[in-house]
Image: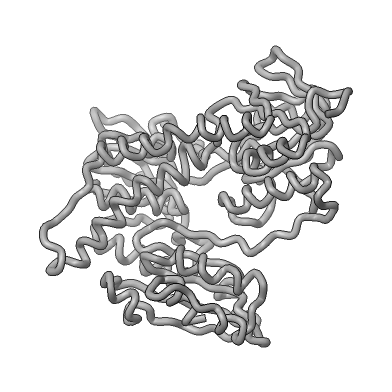
Amino acid sequence: MSEKFDFDVLYIGAGHATFDGAAPLAETGVSVGVIESGLVGGTCPNRGCNAKIALDEPVKMTREAQRMQGIVKGNISIDWPKNIDHKQEIIDVLPDGLTARLENAGAKIIKGHAQFKDNHTVVVDDKKEVTAEKIVIATGLRPHRLDIEGTELGHDSEDFLNLRDLPEKLTIIGSGYIGMEFATMANEAGADVTIMLHSNKVLRKFYQPYVQKVVDDLKSRGVTFIENADVQKFAKNGDNFTITYQDGKTLETGWILDATGRIPNLENLGLENVGVKYDKTGVFVNDYLQTNIDNIYAAGDVVSNDLPKVTPAAYFESKYLMSLFSGQTKDPIKYPVIPSVVFTSPRIAQAGMSVDEGKEKNYDISTNDLANYWYYIVDKEPIAESKQIHDKDGHLVGVTEISDQAEDAVNALLPAIEFKFNREQVGRLIGIFPTIGYAAWHRA
């Protein structure tokens, strides 16, 4: 440990961009501090990924039971309050577990809000000064809120994840990951759902013909989509709310979810005190995750880059900084293939090169009709298709799939994309049969 500072490395924020690397870093003998103003674990374990996948599991089960009627007898439905309770049981233990993981490794957790005083010093809750040789900004993102009259009447994603009494009518502003995933859950649990789009595009970062299949399926289940909504105002109307949109049109609803995106948590960090460069997209870093101030770094969703804002990216950056700070590497970061998925029903998952880029490069793009493939017939999936992109040397360079098992199929193919396996090498990978992994490799 440096004699000059309290810590060798100090992390601001305790999410995946911190704890995945901070714990093993502390185990190497590096002195590590972690400042966190909220729950240890950050967004993903406490109010994001873990919570939403717990709430989605009954949705997945009910959809399969619907398809299997005639074989499975009786209808099942979601008890939403019990679903919320189950979610809470799953996530309640996570902060203490992650705290123990960090502290058992030798890291010290400091509770409070950090603000830079200089490039080696932060002040916690305007009281305690903490110094470090290196500081990592890992403060993540928070929900964006519409700048309109009555915006305080809207709710964010955390509110939805804790919503015990599902309203009869629910309106979602936004059609990204959060909007579409939560619409799927609320619709299956019995709510009358309306989605109001900023433009006419849903899930713009995913393959649009597959997105349209998800949209069409939700429409068939009663979800209403309003394109180019131009939301202007929220107002209270007795026990309900009125949304004003499109030059004076109005919509009555029982609850409003503002799912218009997420923005970097950078306010009140004192970045102007040290001159760290950033903008509304996040903190600027180089290929070593280093800001323009040489001892200050950033990792995770708060970084300004073109990567998907997903947990695997934050995990990889955290592990990279661990290797860099412990002297295990001096190389710049080299990102692997980072997959992404939207947990609608069916899911859309993707990794590597997109279909549109493959078309531009005139690569070989194969289409697999999975709804008529035996493994997907087992659970009667009506919507199942994948596209695989091979370069001119036969390497698998990209895949996108729509199905209820898309995330597992894409996970199975990641090694082939990352390590540029050719068809002969892919042919030597024989998965466990019968599993979705085997089916994915068989098509590659």
Closer to the camera in the image, 14 or 184: 14
Residue 9: x %, y % from top left: 77, 33
Does 89 sit left or right of 331 as displayed? left
Q: Can see residue 226?
A: yes
Does 313 sit left or right of 377 as displayed? right
Q: Residue furthest top?
A: 127
The residue drawn where x is 84% and y is 42% is 292
Q: How many marks?
A: 0
Q: Can see residue 279?
A: no
Residue 411: x %, y % from top left: 51, 65
The residue drawn where x is 60% and y is 60% is 338
Residue 346 is drawn in which quadrant? bottom left
Vertical position of residue 69 compared to residue 188: above or below: below
Does 56 sit left or right of 238 as displayed? right
Vertical position of residue 66 compared to residue 234: above or below: below
Closer to the camera in the image, 164 or 205: 164
The residue drawn where x is 63% and y is 29% is 103
Residue 172: x %, y % from top left: 37, 46
Does 119 sit left or right of 176 as displayed? right
Name the image quarter holding the N terminus: top right
The residue drawn where x is 84% and y is 31% is 133
